[in-house]
Amino acid sequence: MKKVLVIMSTFAPLNSCGSIPNTKLVKYLAREDTELTLIAYTALPHDPQDETLLPKEMERIRSFRVRHSPLFLKTLSRSRQAITDSGVKQKMKADQRPLQAWIVSHLKRAYISARSRDWAQSAIRIIRRELKNEHFDAVYSSYPSYEAHLAARYARKKHLADKWIADFRDPMGYVGFDKYGYKRAIRRQHRVERWADRITVVSEGALDKFRFPDVPEEKLSYIPNGYDPEDFTVCAKKQNESDRVLRLFYAGMLYEGRRDLRVVFRAISELIEEGRVAPERISVEYAGNEWTVLCDFAETYGLRGICKEYGYVPRHRVMEIMEQIDVTLVCSVNTAEDHGVVTGKVFELLLVEKPIVTIINGDLPNSELAGIIRECNAGVVFEEATQERDYPALKQWLLRAYESKQKTGTVPSELDRAKREQYSYAQIAGKLFSIL
C-alpha cells in the first residue's frame, strides 16, 4: 500500500473548473492500493459551492481543510471582489484608460501572489503541527494555484515524502499575460519543475511548454483530464422531442470573446437565409457569466433572438439542462504560442453522449482537442486554420442535425464508447498510481 500526501488548493465542494478534476482524481486514487492524506482549501462563503461534488470516498481519506490566515481574511480578502470586478472592467476599457488598466492589473497580480503565499503558509503550519512525525511514499500537489506546490516542496525538503509529483492542469504562463506577468509565471513553473521529482501535465501538446534544458525529459508525464462514469447515473441521453426546436448549448467561460463562437451563428444565419432552417426552430443556449459576450456573437448576424440565458448555475443544474438539449458546444484555441489546450469540459460532454460541435480558434491546424473528438466520433470539428475545408462541413452537419430534429425529434449520437474509455477517471487514476 502506498501512503500518499495530497495537497490541493482547489477541491470540492468548491464548484470551479479546477476543483472538479482534482476531486475526481482523488476519488479514484482512493480506490487504488493507497492510504491518502488530503490537505485542501476551505471554501469561503462567497465561493461557489456544490456539495454533490464530494465523493463518498472522503469517508476513508484523512483530511485537513486549510483556510487563509485571519489577517488575510480581514484585509485583502475583503477587497477581493472589488479588485476582481474592476480588473475585468478596466481590461475591457484598456484602450480608453490604459493607465487605470495597468494599475488594476498590477493590483490583481499582487493580490493573487499574496493569496498564494498566505495559503501555502497556512498549509505548511498544518504539516508542521499534524504530520511532522509521519512519512509518505509520495506527496502529490496540483495546480491551478502555485501555493499547493509551495506546500509540497516544504514536505519534500523536510523528508516527509520519498518523492514529489507536481501536477499542472494548465501551464502557468499564458499568451494573454503581459510581458512581465508571463515571464514571472514561467520562472515559477520552471522552479517547480526543477524542485519536483516528477511533473504531470494535462495534454500531450502542452508538454512543449514544460521542456527546459535543465529538466530531464523523463520527469514529464501526460495525465489527461477525463470523465467520471459514475456521474449522474441517469446520464443525459434523453432529448425533448415535443417542440422540434434544435437546441445547442454552451456552458462556461468565453474569456471575454477570446473563445469565439461566431462561426456557429454565421452557419445558422446562412441556413435561415437559404430557407432551410426556420429561426423559431433553433436556439443557442448559454450557462455562465458572459451572456453579453454570447449576445455580441449572435448580434453580428442578427440572431440575438435565438439565444437563451440560464446565468451561472451549479454543475448538477448544467447536467440537468443537458438532458433536454440536442447538441453541445465546446470552444478552444490552437496557435503556435498557445497549443495543446484541451478543456476538461469536453470529457464530461463525452459522458453525456450528445453530439459535440467543436470550434477551434487560432491559426494552427490539427489541434489535440480536435483529434479527441474525431477519434471518438463525437461530433463535428471546425478549425479556423482549415476553415475552407471545415466550414462547409460544419454548415452541412448543422443542417443534418436540424433535419433529424424535425423528422424524428432527436439528434442521434454516433460516439465510439470503446475509444472514450481511455478518458475515464478510473483509467487515469491507475496511470497516476503507477508513478506515485
Image (cartoon, rainbow, N blue to C red):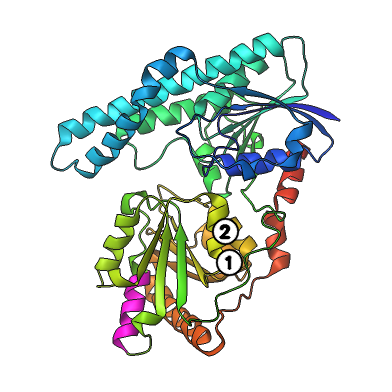
Q: Residues within 10 Å of mark 1 (few under 14, many from 20)?
A: some
The residue shown at (64%, 40%) is 23
The location of residue 306, given as percent across then percent down, is 34, 72
The quarter in which the N terminus is drawn is top right
The location of residue 242, given as percent across then percent down, is 53, 81
Classify residue 179 by image quadrant.
top left
Q: Element under label 2?
A: helix
Q: Is residue 417 above or below residue 21?
A: below
Q: Amino acid at mark 1?
A: Glu
Please name the residue that numbered disc 2 is placed on. Answer: 319
Looking at the picture, tell me which residue is in the foreground, 165 or 399: 399
Q: Amino acid at mark 2?
A: Met
Classify residue 392 by image quadrant.
bottom left
Looking at the picture, tell me which residue is in the foreground, 137 or 127: 127
Of helix, strand and loop, which mostly describes the magenta segment?
helix
Q: Element under label 1?
A: loop
Asked if residue 142 lies left or right of residue 330, the reply is right
The location of residue 232, given as percent across then percent down, is 67, 57
Q: What segment is highlighted magenta in the picture?
A: 264-274
Asked if residue 409 lies left or right of residue 231, the reply is left
Asked if residue 311 lies left or right of residue 130, the reply is left
